[in-house]
Amino acid sequence: MNQQLAVGIDIGGTNTVFGIVDRRGNLLSEGSISTRAHAEVPLFVEDLYNALSPLIEKMADTGEVKGIGIGAPNGNYFKGAIEFAPNLPWKGVIPLANLVKDAFGLPVVLTNDANAAAIGEMTYGAARGMKDFIMITLGTGLGSGIVANGELVYGHDGFAGELGHVIVNTEGRLCGCGRYGCLETYVSATGLARTMRELLDTHQTDSRLRGLPPEEITSKSTRDAALHGDKLALDAFEYTGRMLGQQLANFIAFSSPEAIILFGGLTKAGDLILKPTVRHMEESLLEIYKDKVKVLLSELKESDAAILGASALVWEMKD
């Protein structure tokens, strides 16, 4: 009997990547199309079908595709729709799950990209065997997925767990959501770069980055400077870790997870971000939670993680 396979699709603002995955998390086939090039959703779905269906057909001798999982910005699990995603070319509410289901004739489940990452981590990665954990994705913004009692927390409307939009400073930085002081404006790749630029503006300390054009002061250049012992770059990581650690202590207070799992480009800084985060988290925790919650880095290969996370949604489907 052929094994079951799952299709994972991750929709980003620039490109959409997809692949076919087995139950062990092996990526058997993959491809991509442009998201940005499709101003009309039906044309996007048509292009997706033309690119993906040949891969599915080639897998016929290997296994049977059980369904399709989609991770997308502002993806609503309950409605199977993308709702008002600011970084996609399509506006309003897009019933994407039904459109893809009609095109492929397969069951389709959709959620937001951070929730998909959490399910992927629970299925294939560092959260295997865990029933209570929080996934934090540290990229351009801060995404999150909360798993409690083995189930992803969606809330009544499908949008629970937007921890990146917890307000940490009511008079703080302007966020892309239109509010001020959201956590992701401080704890993200863009947040770290902004902190570094502010430190250069307000301190006279020598720095490898001083004098560079603002657009060249990025999370990567800040990391590289910190690895060379640059004081202001190290301060930027300390500040970012403090902001993240203090908020992780708050998140732990409401769900008491076994672990916090960090994923995304900012985690490439390793101990530069991990050590201050854990230190400030432990300092801020209620006594009953101290030394109980692990902070782990994702075990998913970054280049495959989006597809794996989306594909893992399929294994959660009810037969």
Image: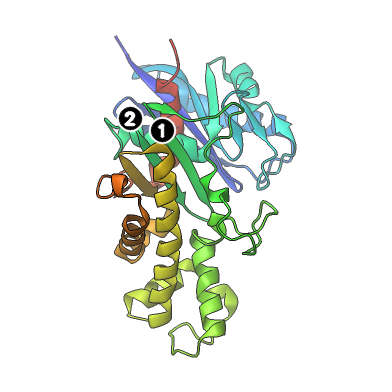
Q: Nearer the viewer, residue 183 or 99?
A: 183
- Picture residue at 33% right of the left edge, 59% below the top: 283
Q: Position of residue 238 (x, y in %)?
A: 39, 69
Q: Nearer the viewer, residue 76 or 253?
A: 253
From the viewer's perspective, is 293 left or right of 29?
left
Q: Is residue 66 above or below residue 224?
A: above
Q: Is residue 247 above or below residue 77?
A: below
Amino acid at the residue labelled 2: Lys
Tell how many labels.
2
Residue furthest to the front in view is 287
Which class describes the residues within 10 Å of circle 1: few (<14), some (14-19), or many (20+)?
many
Q: Position of residue 253 (x, y in %)?
A: 41, 43
Asked if residue 307 can be seen in this view, the reply is no
- Picture residue at 40% right of the left edge, 21% below the top: 315
Image quadrant holding the N terminus, namely top left
Q: Which color scheme did the rendering employ for the protein?
A: rainbow
- Which of the 4 quarters of the picture holds residue 207? bottom left
The kind of secondary structure element at disc 2 is loop
Q: Nearer the viewer, residue 72 or 156?
A: 156
Amino acid at the residue labelled 1: Val
The residue pinned by badge 2 equals: 131
Q: Position of residue 153 (x, y in %)?
A: 48, 30
C-alpha separation, residue under disc 1 versus residue under disc 2: 7 Å
The residue pinned by badge 1 equals: 147
Q: Which mark is residue 83?
A: none
